[in-house]
Image (tube, rainbow, N blue to C red):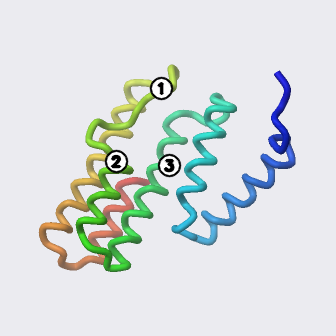
Amino acid sequence: MATPPGAGPAALRFAAAASWQVVRGRCVENFPRVLEFLRSLRVAAPGLVRYRHHERLCMGLKAKMVVEMILQGRPWAQVLNALHRHFPESGPVVRDPKATKQDLKKISEAQEAFCQQVKRLVEAPVDLASKLQSALLLIQ
């Protein structure tokens, strides 16, 4: 099968460098593009990064997007919609046959803990800064 035009090693390096700059610069508005790049890379090279590491990276980016919405003062309805979109209650969809039960358990626990922290903030939005920091630490 021939490589599609524009999908060679140079394009891949360019996309990886651009993604790194977005993450390094904490340009949260472009995190969805980074997530898409990570998904594409996972499909193209499934053994490149272990499942748990890939999921932790993606969860961290998604969590940062949700936290940024809170810090920007977005309405709680928008925040909860983003939370449910990025962290569905059904849990992560596993497409990696090498994912272990321990991997799945750790990912699921981290997602659940983060979602609970955000939902607690919705119920009682006091001491926002420290609560958000502790919620982000749960993901890492």
- Residue 132 circle label: none
Counting residues from the start of the chain, the first of labels 1 and 2 encountered is 2
Q: Name the residue under label 2.
A: 87
SS state under label 3:
helix
Of the residues shown, which amino acid type is indicated by label 2? Phe
Residue depicted at x 37% and y 67%: 67
Q: Residue 99 carries which label?
A: 1
Q: Distance between the residues labelled 3 and 2?
A: 11 Å
Q: Which mark is residue 58?
A: 3
Name the residue at the left extreme.
123
Residue occupying image coordinates x 27% and y 70%: 131
Q: Type of residue at label 1?
A: Ala
Q: Earlier in the sequence, mark 1 or mark 3?
A: 3
What residue appears at the point 68 percent right and 60 percent down from the top-left corner?
20
Q: Nearer the viewer, mark 1 or mark 3?
A: 3
Q: Label 3 near label 1: C-beta < 8 Å? A: no
Q: Is residue 121 above or below residue 87?
A: below
Q: In the image, what residue occupies the spot 28% across and 36% down?
A: 90
Mark 2 surroundings within 10 Å by alpha-carbon count, few (fewer than 14), some (14 through 19), many (20 or more): some
Q: Give amino acid for label 3.
A: Cys
125 left or right of 139 in image: left
Q: Position of residue 105 (x, y in %)?
A: 34, 33
In the visual, does 25 lie left or right of 80?
A: right
Front position among marks 1 and 2: 2
Judged left or right of residue 119, residue 60 is right
Q: Residues within 10 Å of mark 1 (few under 14, many from 20)?
A: few
Give the mark, 3 or 2, whose residue is nearer the N terminus.
3
Report the Cα–Cα distance between label 1 and label 3: 15 Å
| Residue 34 x %, y % | 60, 54
